[in-house]
Each structure stands twice: as structure tokens, then as C-alpha cells.
Amino acid sequence: VMMALRSAAWLLGQRLGSLGLEAASPLMAGSSAAAGACMEQVRHASNQAVKQRIRAIKNIGKITKAMKMVAASKMRNAQNAVETSRGIVDPFVRLFGDHPAISAPKSVTVAITSDRGLCGGLNSNISKYTRALLRMNETGADGAVKEQTVVSIGDKGRSQLLRTDSQLYALSVADTYKVRVTFAQASLIAEELLKNNPDVIRIVYNKFRSAISFKPTVATVLLPDFMEQQASEPSGNKLDAYEMEASAERSDTLRDLAEFQLASTLFNAMLENNCSEHASRMSAMENSTKSAGEMLGKLTLAYNRKRQATITTELIEIIAGASALVDAE
């Protein structure tokens, strides 16, 4: 109460001074001035902190909105490339079938992720499915330990998988999305994968469906020996239904087909994941923009309430100081 009275007296003394009147006493004027200045600084600092937060959130909202627009533009271009690449992969699936649960003594699991973040749980899902595949294929039906290696395409997958499966890590490919994804890039990666002579290569990626839907998918590529074994299965390949007019041996033809299938599948998977990345980033930035707008509204309301409370308090102090001076007279 004394602090409020001193502040009110100081404010009133300032107003009376402008009219040519003097304060009640020098001591009271000095103490009132110090108290009033201190209170004014506290209020000003508090309001200033809220204003700085409002300004920062406005800037964040502008950035996320711009990132959403950029991601939407890139997604449209990537979607056209995805639809074109599916025409290369679909005939291989119809010809050789799909065998995600096949057991092989030597396999390679390729995790396709992005190089950048801020795209929701896109990369975390791929890492989770990759770990699940590795655990499922650790041992065969006879209990023998299988030889497995992990390859990642994208910097985010490397950082996540190295923490849990560093002993299986063989190769990491990064910066593949800085420029336009090409079939030549996929062919070079496929050539590196084939150097270890695996029996089965599993590719884990996000398959693009729509702007709000992308599903983690496993594509399996069999090498020639396993292609021959699967030919006798009910779900095996349908290559024998066609007559091959080739001068080379059947094994060489199968190897060429397997290598081309691997490069085509990698190319399609990279494009699918790239398109899914843009779609996921667009959704994440839209949610961030909405959250920034909601937080901005709450802070603006709090700032206006605090400013109104400050004005009301000052008016009360002026009235209280005037009443105190009148009573003193």
C-alpha cells in the first residue's frame, strides 16, 4: 500500500509540478520517484519480453508458411517423376513377383531416407521398419545365423541406424537429393550393392500415395540363384512363360535382368521417398504455421490484458494519490 501511495504521490507531484505547484516534501518526492521508476521499469520489461516473443513467433510463422509453399511446389514436380518411374518397376513385379518374407543366407537391407529434417516422422518410420526387418532375419529356420548388412541412402537414416546397428553398417550414401534424382545415380548405387554378392536385397522406402498419405514399403530384389528357386513356387516368377531369344546363357540373362531390376527399383524408391518427403514437410509446416498462429493469438491476448491492467493500475494510483493529498490538507 505504501509503495502504491508513494508511486501515486510521485506521479501526482509530476503533474502538479507541470502546473507550477510543489510537492509535499523533498523526502517524499525522492522516495516516490525511486519507487515509481522501479515499478515502471518492471512493467516495461515484462511487456517488452512479451512483445519480443510475439515478434519471434510472427517470424517463425512466416518461415514455416514459406517452407510449406516451397514443399508444395517441389511435390508437384516430384509426383510427375514418380508416376513416370512406376512404369519401369511394375512390369518387374508382375514378372518376378514380390517375396518380402524370403529367407536367404546373405542379404542387404537398404534404408532410403532424406538428407534433411523438418518432415515429421518420415525418417523415423523407415528406421523402425529397417530394424524390424533385421531382427526378423537374424537366423534361419535351422537356427543358423545369417549374414546381413545395412546400407542407407540419406543422411538422416545413417545417423539413426548407426546408433543401434553400427556392427551391420556397410555403406552410406548422402546428398543424393541436392540435384535431380537420375537413373545413373541409382545404377551407381546398385553397382556398389552388388559388389558383396548378396542373395537378396530388400529396399525400405516410403511409397507416395497422396499429399497426406505415404506408406512404408519393402521392395525385394532376388539375385539369379534365388530367382531360379522361386520359379517353382506358386508365387514365383513367370519368366518361363515367355520364350527368350538370347544368344547368351540363361544365367547371364537372369543376371542382367536382376541388375536392371535392382537399378530400376532403387530409382523408383528414391523418387517415391523424395516425393513423400516433400508431402510430409508440407503437412508438418502447415501444422507448425497453425500452431504459431494459435500461440500468437494467446500471446497477443495476454499482452493486451497486461497493458490494460497497467493502465488501470496507473489510473488507480493517480486517484489514490490525489485522495491522499486531499486528506493530508
Image: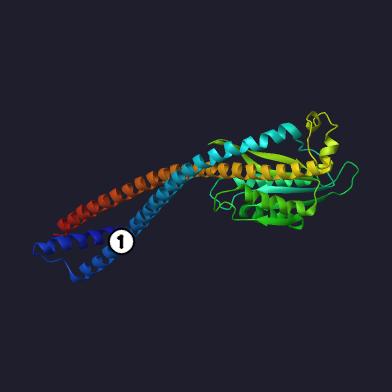
Query: Height in image: 298 above or below 318?
Result: above
Q: In which quarter of the image is residue 121?
A: top right
Residue 181 at x, y percent in the picture = 58, 48
Q: In the rendered view of the protein, which quadrant contains the N terminus?
A: bottom left
Viewer can see residue 237: no
Residue drawn at point x = 50 percent, y = 42 percent? 282
Asked if 83 appears above or below 39 in the picture, the reply is above
* 9 is higher (above) or lower (below) than 245: below
Q: What element carries label 1?
A: helix
Relative to 40, say whether 203 is above or below.
Answer: above
Q: What residue type is labelled 1?
A: Met
Position of residue 139 measured from the top left corner of the image (x, y, whole percent)? 85, 46
| Camera sees residue 68 | yes
Residue 289 location in percent, x, y?
44, 44
Closest to the observer, 248 or 101? 248
In screen coordinates, is 97 left or right of 316?
Answer: right
Q: Which residue carries the number 1 mark?
A: 39
The answer to whether 254 appears left or right of 30 in the picture is: right
